[in-house]
């Protein structure tokens, strides 16, 4: 009888516990009883609200989070780092997204967030305004400090978003997600890095030259090379247009050194910029006979693809943090121009040092990218790298070694710097989607039986899931 009563009491308590747990999951309360997601976010020490923007099916918050300027010496000052939260449900997985530059304050959903139908946290990279310490100690802008920013944000938000997390980003954002995984490999359950360059040895860039010899079609390459060469042949008359443009808009050239240097930099970016953002079919818009084209036709083609405003002080200023990193840790490509006689090229591809004000000291650290590359080859776990076949930044990709586990490098045929999982061949697309679902721990039973059936859990939304990359008129990832 005593055993029967004890069993009944245990069963009653168990039922009560399960019921309470179910109610807690449904209401999403914390221990203090707070259920509203805004209150829960703002209860995190150092978190403050900039604004909330309504969006159907979600809540979208733009926030500031207090970060130490130096994670090694957290008592030596702080700054406000801007983040956004696209909140769906704490019962769903969360995607940690970064573009590696400024954060968008417009609601957007990355491809992994659509695939797993989850929440998304997006981070503005340190030193991109307004997420910049004042005064700015540029020595504190490095990949470890940025990864530590992500680690602190994750640690704070994991208390609210307790399901699996996947980090992602495109281009410099893909690099950022990779570096974060290297320094904090226990945080994320998976990584999806899009079009992430991997410049292991900064002075060895022959892979880019090989890329430009074969990309696309010969007809397209000839058109592009012809316009690029002609823009340098006609340097004098086209620079008159450039001076007029600068005078009209108040452009200055103190950082790069002169209008002449800026002009050549824009022209030498032309072919690279085309393949980064365009496809073979866009070659129809390139003058077919550059030598007989008008000055206006040459100018317009170069300006449309490269942008004559970029290497001005006004154009460079927002990207000072990127060029600082390129010149201190990330590395930068150098390519050659065999279709242009040497007499027309005065400066060649200029180093990142020329794009950063001289008041900011820079020293390159060659070991930084070697360390990342070695770690990925031997320690990658649950990592997916996606590249575009016609994207020049993919000429030096991440590669996997024998030590990698459940990790993949895939290439989307014909795609450029906007390559994604949706653009992969059918078998690879299904495999990539199935692995992302598994890492997020939301694989449907049908997909467990047949991974080839893997599809995004959320339907495509034209507003949230805009996939077209925004063209930035500059040679940067």
Image (spheres, grey):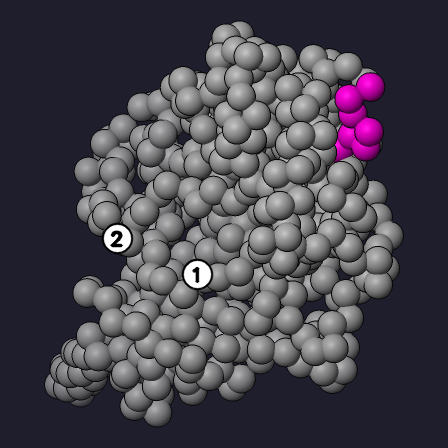
Depicted 176 relative to depicted 38: above or below: above
Return the disc, 2 or 1, that comes first in the chain's sequence.
1
Q: Is residue 69 magenta?
A: no
Q: Would residue 192 be found to the left or right of residue 214 on screen? A: left
**Residue 344 or residue 23, whichever sits in front:** 344
Give the residue number, with chain letter if any, for mark 1. 104
**What's the distance in space between the residues labelled 2 and 1, CA to CA?**
14 Å
Q: Is residue 348 magenta?
A: yes
- Does residue 400 show up? no
Q: Secondary structure at mark 2?
A: loop
Query: Magenta region: which residues?
Result: 343-349
Main SS, magenta region, reads loop
Quadrant of the frame with the C terminus: top right
Q: Residues within 10 Å of mark 1 (few under 14, many from 20)?
A: some
Q: Would residue 278 be found to the left or right of residue 56 on screen? A: right
What is the x, y in percent for residue 204? Answer: 79, 27
């Amino acid at each position: 009888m005593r055993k029967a009563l004890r069993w009944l009491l245990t069963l009653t308590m168990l039922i009560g516990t399960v019921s309470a747990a179910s109610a807690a999951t449904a209401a999403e309360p914390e221990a203090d009883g707070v259920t509203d997601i805004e209150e829960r976010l703002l209860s995190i020490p150092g978190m403050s609200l900039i604004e909330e923007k309504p969006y159907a099916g979600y809540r979208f918050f733009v926030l500031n989070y207090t970060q130490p300027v130096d994670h090694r010496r957290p008592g030596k000052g702080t700054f406000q780092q801007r983040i956004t939260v696209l909140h769906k449900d704490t019962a769903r997985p969360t995607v940690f997204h970064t573009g590696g530059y400024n954060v968008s304050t417009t609601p957007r959903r990355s491809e992994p967030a659509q695939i797993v139908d989850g929440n998304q946290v997006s981070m503005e990279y340190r030193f991109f305004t307004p997420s910049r310490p004042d005064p700015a100690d540029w020595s504190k802008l490095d990949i470890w400090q940025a990864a530590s920013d992500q680690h602190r944000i994750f640690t704070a938000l994991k208390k609210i978003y307790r399901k699996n997390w996947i980090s992602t980003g495109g281009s410099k954002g893909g690099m950022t997600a990779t570096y974060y995984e290297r320094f904090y490999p226990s945080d994320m359950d998976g990584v999806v890095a899009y079009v992430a360059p991997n410049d292991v040895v900064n002075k060895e860039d022959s892979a880019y030259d090989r890329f430009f010899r074969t990309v696309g079609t010969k007809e397209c390459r000839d058109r592009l090379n012809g316009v690029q060469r002609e823009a340098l042949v006609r340097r004098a008359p086209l620079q008159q247009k450039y001076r007029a443009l600068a005078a009209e808009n108040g452009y200055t050239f103190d950082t790069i050194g002169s209008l002449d240097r800026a002009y050549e930099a824009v022209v030498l970016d032309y072919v690279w910029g085309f393949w980064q953002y365009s496809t073979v079919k866009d070659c129809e818009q390139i003058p077919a006979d550059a030598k007989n084209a008008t000055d206006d036709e040459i100018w317009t083609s170069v300006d449309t693809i490269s942008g004559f405003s970029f290497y001005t002080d006004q154009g460079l200023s927002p990207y000072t943090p990127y060029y600082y990193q390129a010149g201190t840790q990330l590395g930068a490509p150098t390519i050659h121009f065999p279709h242009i006689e040497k007499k027309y090229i005065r400066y060649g591809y200029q180093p990142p040092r020329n794009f950063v004000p001289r008041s900011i000291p820079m020293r390159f650290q060659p070991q930084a990218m070697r360390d990342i590359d070695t770690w990925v080859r031997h320690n990658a776990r649950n990592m997916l790298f996606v590249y575009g076949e016609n994207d020049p930044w993919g000429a030096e990709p991440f590669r996997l070694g024998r030590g990698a586990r459940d990790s993949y490098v895939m290439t989307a045929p014909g795609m450029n710097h906007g390559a994604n999982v949706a653009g992969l061949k059918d078998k690879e697309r299904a495999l990539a989607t199935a692995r992302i679902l598994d890492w997020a721990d939301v694989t449907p039973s049908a997909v467990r039986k047949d991974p080839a059936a893997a599809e995004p859990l959320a339907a495509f939304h034209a507003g949230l899931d805009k996939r077209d990359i925004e063209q930035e008129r500059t040679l940067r990832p």
